Image: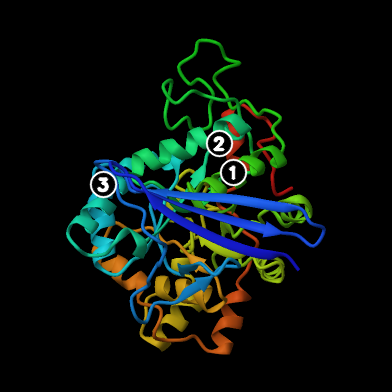
């Protein structure tokens, strides 16, 4: 067995730096050294203390393979309207949320960061008690752009580390400099007069290159945990064969109409936690046609289960995921709904309820690049699930 030796030192005046060196002596005599640093944040950002995320009493949590504890119910911020995100995040933290899910592509990380900072300044919690997730966008998959993108996210959030950093999609697209357009979104140059530039431009960057750079973020302390989003079992099978650090989490679309049973079992077998986005179905996908945009919130079976428990259908959908051992990130800027979405830790669905909900599975995806990327100049879309 390898012998792990941990050494710590604290130094500095103007800015204190905690340096932790992990030295592993392998059985064959080789020595691996990993250095993790945590710097007290400069003016205007939040200090990174030793990690001790704490979910308020009664809230379910997920323990990752590293031992890190992630609150099972987080606040989603995708499509949270500009101008209301800051207040929504601060209010959510006041109401007990300790897990905030965000991303470069959502275009609101500066507001999310302001909301976090306000809650901390008001004494609601400390940075160490929060779990903040963000995501690497498609344009930054090349090794030389991964840290650049992460540091931009940290600047916008006003933090010096994120708890979890995910590769948003298994899709690499042509690099767009931050100073040119941010967030860069899907189309390379929407203002160009050249039709060939007014579309999504995929580029060849292998997962191995991107993941290697993600691992460096972990070793530098910029991301405490690293993981995936929208990646299939096949992608994980390959990654697990050669990675230095296995993914801690894979965030994918899960709701009663897309239960992802085999996927979640695969992840459980390989100690990869699963976070479900869009847990309430189609509400955020206004561009879908009426046939595809089937909402779980009006499903008769779910309504009946909710009635039996004296809960809302949204609470049933969230509890179903939590009870499966998953985490979930419903979005709401409404304070009352925020509280309701979080109130799923002190009651349970019956075995029959769980089976009935899982039986609603239609393998219906709302968020599928194989469909929506057709609108970005790709006739066949980008069929990552084909």
Residue at 60% of width from left, 25% of height from top? 174
Which mark, by number, is residue 114?
Answer: 3
Quick check: 30 above or below 317? above
Residue at 29% of width from left, 55% of height from top? 89
Secondary structure at numbered mark 1 = helix
Secondary structure at numbered mark 3 = helix
Q: Nearer the viewer, residue 78 or 153?
A: 153
Q: Which residue is mark 1?
A: 216
Q: Nearer the viewer, residue 211 or 32?
A: 32
Residue at 37% of width from left, 71% of height from top? 54
The residue positioned farthest toward the right in the image shown = 28
Q: Nearer the viewer, mark 2 or mark 3?
A: 2
Residue at 47% of width from left, 72% of height from top? 317
Q: Position of residue 377 (x, y in %)?
A: 61, 26
Q: Nearer the viewer, residue 124 or 315?
A: 124
Q: Which residue is mark 2?
A: 146
Label 1 vs label 2: CA separation? 9 Å
Q: Earlier in the sequence, mark 2 or mark 3?
A: 3
Secondary structure at numbered mark 2 = helix
Quick check: 173 above or below 263? above
Q: Is residue 128 at all visible to an observer of this figure?
A: yes
Left/right of residue 297 with respect to residue 82 in the rendered view = right
Q: Nearer the viewer, mark 1 or mark 2?
A: 1
Q: Position of residue 326 (x, y in %)?
A: 54, 70
């Amino acid at each position: 067995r390898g012998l792990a030796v941990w050494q710590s030192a604290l130094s500095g005046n103007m800015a204190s730096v905690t340096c932790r060196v992990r030295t592993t002596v392998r059985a064959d005599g080789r020595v691996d050294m990993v250095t993790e640093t945590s710097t007290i944040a400069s003016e205007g950002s939040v200090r990174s203390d030793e990690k001790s995320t704490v979910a308020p009493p009664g809230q379910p949590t997920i323990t990752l393979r590293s031992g890190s504890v992630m609150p099972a119910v987080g606040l989603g911020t995708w499509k949270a309207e500009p101008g209301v995100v800051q207040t929504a995040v601060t209010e959510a933290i006041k109401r007990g949320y300790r897990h905030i899910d965000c991303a470069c592509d959502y275009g609101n990380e500066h507001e999310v960061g302001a909301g976090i900072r306000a809650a901390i300044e008001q004494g609601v919690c400390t940075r160490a008690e929060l779990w903040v997730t963000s995501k690497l966008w498609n344009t930054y998959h090349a090794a030389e752009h991964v840290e650049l993108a992460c540091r931009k996210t940290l600047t916008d959030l006003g933090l010096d580390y994120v708890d979890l950093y995910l590769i948003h999609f298994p899709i690499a697209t042509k690099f767009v400099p931050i100073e040119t357009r941010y967030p860069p979104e899907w189309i390379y140059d929407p203002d160009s007069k050249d039709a060939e530039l007014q579309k999504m431009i995929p580029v060849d960057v292998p997962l191995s290159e991107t993941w290697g750079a993600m691992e460096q973020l972990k070793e530098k302390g910029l991301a405490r945990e690293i993981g995936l989003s929208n990646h299939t079992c096949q992608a994980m099978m390959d990654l697990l064969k050669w990675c230095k650090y296995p993914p801690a989490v894979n965030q994918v679309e899960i709701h009663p109409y897309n239960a992802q049973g085999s996927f979640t079992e695969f992840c459980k077998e390989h100690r990869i936690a699963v976070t479900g986005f869009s847990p309430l179905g189609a509400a955020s996908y206004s561009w879908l046609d009426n046939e595809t945009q089937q909402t779980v919130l009006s499903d008769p079976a779910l309504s009946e289960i909710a009635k039996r428990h004296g809960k809302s259908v949204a609470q049933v959908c969230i509890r179903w995921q939590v009870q499966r051992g998953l985490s979930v990130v419903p979005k709401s800027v409404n304070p009352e709904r925020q509280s309701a979405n979080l109130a799923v830790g002190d009651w349970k669905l019956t075995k029959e309820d769980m089976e009935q909900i899982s039986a609603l599975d239609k393998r219906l995806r709302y968020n599928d690049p194989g469909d929506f990327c057709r609108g970005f100049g790709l006739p066949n879309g980008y069929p990552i699930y084909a």
